[in-house]
Image: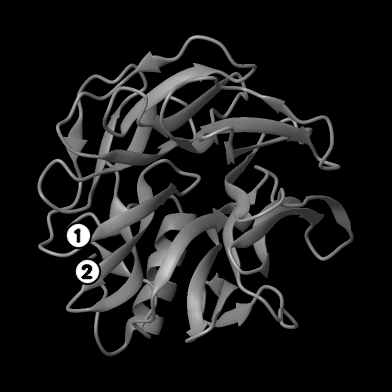
Amino acid sequence: MRCCDGPGIGRCVALAVLVALAGGTCAAEGPVRLTPDGRLKFSPVVVSGGREIVYVELANPTLYRLSRLNLADGSTVPLHADAQTSEFEPAFTSDGKIYAYLKTSGVLRVNLVIQEVGGAKRGEVPPADGFSGMRSPALAPDRERVVYSFHDGGRQQLFEVDFSGKSKWALTDSAGINNWPAFSPDGREIVFGSSRDGDFEIYRMPAAGGAAQRLTFSPKQDIRPRFSPDGKRIAFTSHRDGNAEIYVMNVDGSQQRRLTDSPDRDDYCDWYPDGKRLVIVSERAGRHDLYAIPAQ
């Protein structure tokens, strides 16, 4: 199937989804455009077995909201229709039943909220005093832990809480900034970005904390890593080519390969359940939309 773009995008995307659900390959020749509006977007997450994507979009000049895209018909709805403050960085459990997100509660103050889909709030982690807040929540496959990044004592570390937002403890203790954690499918490891060695690189460590293995050694930033559904590969954003592009590598850091090639920004990747595709945010001529790209 050719790249879906321009007029008729809704029909093209719907056909692409049907092909994928039937076990076929889609977008083998290039990216498939999933949204047509061009609004500023961040942090897409593939949910509902690959049938929906939850992402952040700029709804108006003062409000970022979580939106849910139905890939079957291209329709979008707000995840929280009554949200009065900005919301960011959604993360879901593998079964899609519990999710976490960040919610502003004041100027440069951000809360971490954990709740059931269509149900009650499970927990909340409030910001500390002053200008502070959590970043980049990741939910463990065992549905018991949330890992996030938090500025503490002049450094930004990874912390863990249970699903009630309690029992906080630190997973990292290093120089620099540690951010963008993501669990392996079996929950045993975490991959993340860190500037501990002077530049943002990708690291992997046990989910309980401990020694971290450095996976990338590029001269520019490598950030936002995500394990593939089978745990054998890691997709991430790299600036090594002068702008943001999507890369993939083996879980040990070998065979690093660029997947996108655009003069503009390609960023914020997440895997489809089949492991054959990624959803990304791509900037084209000043417009930001979701695209599905091959991961092979």
Return the x and y of residue 83 as percentages of the image width and height: 71, 78
Q: Compared to 161, does 170 lie above or below?
A: above
The mark found on residue 30 in the picture is 1
Q: Is residue 246 visible?
A: yes
Q: Which residue is farthest right?
A: 120
- Give the residue drawn at x 39%, y 31%: 194
| Image height of 208 relative to 113, above or below | above
Residue 43 percent coordinates (x, y): 47, 58
Residue 81 placed where, x, y %?
71, 82
Residue denoted by label 2: 3
Q: Amino acid at mark 2?
A: Cys
- Of residues 105 and 288, the one drawn nearer to the viewer in this rendering: 105
Q: Which image quadrant: the N terminus?
A: bottom left
Residue depicted at x 76% and y 52%: 126
* Vertical position of residue 65 compared to residue 133: above or below: below
- Residue 78: quadrant of the picture: bottom right
Residue 230 falls left or right of residue 36: right
Farthest-out residue, top: 211
Q: Are marks 2 and 1 in contact (CB under 8 Å)?
A: yes
Q: In the image, 111: left or right of 175?
A: right
Name the image quarter holding the C terminus.
top left
Task: Let me know if residue 71 appears in the view.
Answer: no
Give the percent coordinates (x, y) of residue 19. Answer: 40, 61
Q: Residues within 10 Å of mark 2 (few under 14, many from 20)?
A: some
Position of residue 224 relative to residue 215, above or below, is: below
Which callout, 2 or 1, points at the residue further toward the start of the chain?
2
71 relative to 48 in the view: left or right: left
- Residue at position x 81%, y 40% from top? 163
Left or right side of 111 for 60 = left
Res 101 label: none
